[in-house]
Amino acid sequence: MYNLLLTGLMIDSVLIVIAVLMQPSKQDDAMSALSGGSPDLFQQQKARGFEAFMQRVTVVLGVIFFVLALALAYLSSH
């Protein structure tokens, strides 16, 4: 059981990295990345389409990662 959960955690870790790298950039240019913000800081736009899908996938993978990590910690302590 422990090895199965550990394998699932490693696969989930790789999928999280892939999901984060696939998300579109929110920065306009390199200067705004260095300065820490852009002039339209308070103009929030809701994510749509692919961006919204990737955000949901990342959240679901993060929750799975957290649950698997807790299960592994519980199994290793007993």
Image: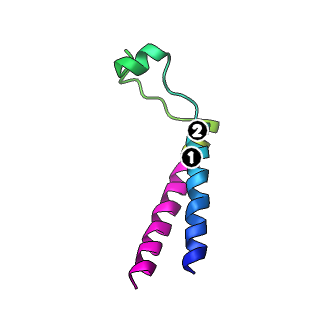
Contact between marks 1 and 2 (CB within 8 A): the answer is: yes
- The number of callouts visible is 2
At a point 51% along the width and 52% down the height, the residue shown is: 59
**Residue type at the position of mark 1:** Val
Q: Looking at the rendering, in which quadrant would you find the N terminus?
A: bottom right
Dot 2: what SS? helix
Res. 21 mark? 2
Q: Is residue 72 magenta?
A: yes
Res. 33 image quadrant:
top left
Q: Position of residue 70 (x, y in %)?
A: 43, 70
Furthest-right residue in this view: 50
Gap in angstroms between the C-alphas marked 1 and 2? 6 Å
At a point 39% along the width and 19% down the height, the residue shown is: 34
Q: Nearer the viewer, residue 3 or 16?
A: 3
Q: Position of residue 28 (x, y in %)?
A: 50, 18
**Residue type at the position of mark 2:** Leu
Q: Looking at the rendering, in which quadrant would you find the C terminus?
A: bottom left
Name the dominant secondary structure of the magenta segment. Answer: helix
Few, some or many residues within 10 Å of mark 1 (<14, 14–19, 20+): few
Q: Is residue 43 magenta?
A: no
Res. 17 mark? 1
Looking at the rendering, the stretch of residues picked out in magenta corresponds to: 56-78
